[in-house]
Amino acid sequence: MSLLLTNATFIDWQSLEFKKTHLLVEEGLRGGIQFIDDPSQYPEYQIIDCEGKLVTKSFGVGHHHAYSAMAKGMPAPKVNPQNFHEILQYVWWNLDKCLDKETVEYSALLTAMACAKAGSTFVIDHHAAPNFIEGSLEIMAKAFENVGVNHLLCYEITDRDGSDKATQGIVETESYLNKYQGLVGLHASFTVGDETLKKSVSLANRLQSGLHIHIGEDLYDQTQCEEVYHKRVVQRLADAGGLESSKTLLVHCLHLDENERSLIKNSPVWVAQNAESNMNNNVGYFNGAGLGERILFGTDGMHSDMLQSAKAAFFVGQRFDNINYSSVYRRFRNIHRYLKTNNFTGDGENNLVILDYRSGTEINQQNFLGHFVFGLKAEQISHVISNGKLIVANQNLITVDENEILKESRKLANFLWQRMKK
């Protein structure tokens, strides 16, 4: 049933213009919204009374790791990591190797549910499961769609487990991209050999896709590249033809020199910033200087709350980045520009959030950005609409049984943690 939002205070996500109105919300991937004067003329529509609430475009996650959804509360690793490479080796590469069909599916369900309740109806995800590669992306896609969250998925192609696993990752990627929109995922330069890099870039070009790769997250990525390939990471990617698509997404981009920043700025690629993950891993701080305006926010699997990610980037950026009220909001909304630029579906104007934001001070077009940084929170989201369909109502998911999924997930997580101890 189509939706009618009455008595809404609608905020245009681009101009920040406020408008007191009623909205008809069309259902479908290419549906839109219409402003109307008399809601009584549409008795067949499902009505949501938005009196006293704010309505605006929903959010999107620019870089996620759904495979880490069962990490919260997991046992400590066998070895206490002393650096970033050991964090990967003893924590994340141990976890992803233990994933199977059920844990991949439920990790995707958990992630989609958390994203939806936090107002995100689109997720760009970077997946890894070296011992369950074939068919993993389609399982994830169906899980996201069951919740009602749109997606742009990829599999993390890497040589860290040998050339056979790298080949399996390429095969899975091609199989998936023949049926769904997505990207060609690569882990990072230091785990991707020249042959795998060449094949991945070729695949992305042939299927008119782009790359999704970690760049300079830790200084090790650069030192290894210079020792082995006698060049820096971004230059290596550029030489392989990896900076030519506007669909390509470079993640982290912490340890870059001026030439690398120039290469990125003068290419059509986009950058995904993940402030909280960088701080958690103690790898450094993002600085957008010299990168241009094509910067968006991700969570790197830390959580699914993009309002929280924006605040973190703003606050840490006061010391390490050139970021202000306007630019933090622009980065927050750049995922929409990325998706539109590249003609990806699932982020139409009929993707909306309704916020029950009760402020003791006036909110308007002129001071909205102050409220965005210091006031708006995910817990104030009452309803979420994806592709014109209501997926969260009164802070409850209505597309899936959240309690049953959480119950089953807790069982699966315990099995996963036991496998990780072996």
Image (spheres, rainbow, N blue to C red):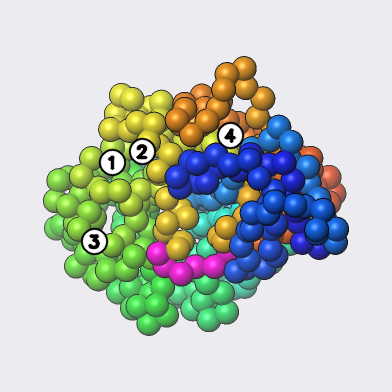
Label 3 crowding class (10 Å Cα cut-off): few <14, some 14-19, many 20+? some
Residue 320 x/y as whole percent: 29, 29
Residue 348 x/y as whole percent: 57, 61
- What is the three-letter code of the residue carrying label 3? Ser
- The kind of secondary structure element at disc 1 is loop
Numbered circles on residues, count: 4
Q: Can residue 342 be found in the magenta stretch?
A: yes
Label 1 crowding class (10 Å Cα cut-off): few <14, some 14-19, many 20+? many
Residue where numbered disc 3 is placed: 267
- The kind of secondary structure element at disc 3 is loop
* Residue numbers of the magenta segment: 341-346
- Mark 4 or 1: in front is 1
- CA gap between label 3 and label 1 equals 15 Å
Label located before the other in sequence (3 or 4): 4
Residue where numbered disc 1 is placed: 288
Q: Can residue 226 be found in the magenta stretch?
A: no
- Check residue 76 in the rendering and tell me which mark sits there, or answer none: 4
Label located before the other in sequence (4 or 1): 4
Q: Is residue 106 above or below residue 366?
A: below
Residue 168 x/y as whole percent: 50, 74
Q: Identify the residue at horizontal 24%, vertical 55% (top origin).
A: 264
- What is the three-letter code of the residue carrying label 1? Gly
Q: Identify the residue at horizontal 64%, vertical 54% (top origin).
A: 35
* Residue 107 visible in the shown view: no
- CA gap between label 4 and label 1 equals 34 Å
